Image (cartoon, rainbow, N blue to C red):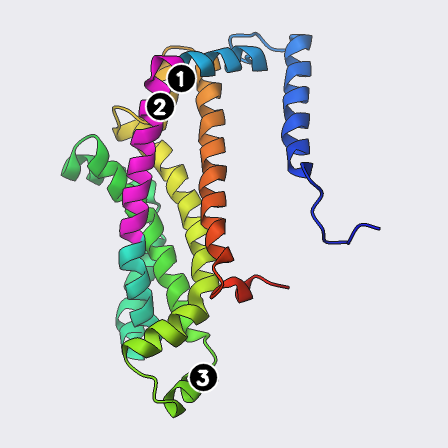
Amino acid sequence: MRAPNRPIPLLGLAGPVLIVAAWAAVSALQLFPSSLFPDPGAVGRGLVTEFMSGRLVQDVLASLFRVGAGFLLATAIGIPAGLLLGHSAMARAALLPLVNFFRNLSPLAWIPFAILWLGIGDPPAIFLIFMAAVFPVVLSTAAAVANIPSVYFRVAGDLGIKGPRLLSEVTLPAIAPQVITTLRVTAGLSWLVVVAAEMIAGRDGLGFAVWDARNGLRIDLLAAVMVVIGLIGVGLDRLLVQMTRIPSVRWGYER
């Protein structure tokens, strides 16, 4: 008998296969004009054409660069800021209202300022991704630090662990599972924002490719780029999931 929680191989492909089958069936019935509802074959051919021309690869690399830069910048600033807020009641009292104010501003609301301040291209997109990712990282890290059981610190104090050792041997391992979960969420958010930013303030990238296909009435290319965006988003999440396999943080995910 199969164990109740044991994953079934290839079960994750069932949903995509069913969607493509339903898509092909609706296309075959011609309920909508092909110019508005391309069939899977046309989207596949558009995908191959874009890949062979090199445009798709260039757009993917441009978007990944922007997401990587904005996300890493948000992580590099957000985690230390969250550690500060989590450890210091005075810092929370002084800075938390400001963090809450900015986190409630949609990153897309910054687009006009991003264009005025930074022009067109990589800088405004990186800025928007940073604004979308940094505040969730700050708040999640601060909450994770605040929720560390006080007994951890008492034991560390009894063992003479303090300063950088307290951070590396107690605080960071204790908050790692929650921070990794937050990074997965913010990476997905960053991937969403880069598409929107490139549609408005970009000259290349997958968001610009979507907008360009729309302007050219190439719905097949538009759908092809959307498929690529979704697949890369899943790939980024799978990449970050690998962090949960690190032995020092695996405890937070085991049941």
> For mark 3, what is the residue?
150
Q: Compare residues 131 and 239 and report the one nearer the observer.
A: 239
Q: Which residues are magenta?
A: 52-74
Q: Compare residues 135 and 16 and report the one nearer the observer.
A: 16
Judge whether residue 245 can be spotted in this image: yes
Under circle 2, the secondary element is helix
Q: Compare residues 132 and 63 and report the one nearer the observer.
A: 63
> For mark 2, what is the residue?
57
Residue 212, given in percent of the width and then of the height, sits at 34, 17
Under circle 3, the secondary element is helix
Mark 1 vs mark 2: which is more N-terminal?
1
**Residue drawn 34% across the image and 89% down it:** 160
**Residue drawn 21% across the image and 30% down it:** 121
Judge whether residue 144 can be spotted in this image: no
Mark 1 vs mark 3: which is more N-terminal?
1
Name above or below for residue 104 compared with residue 111: below
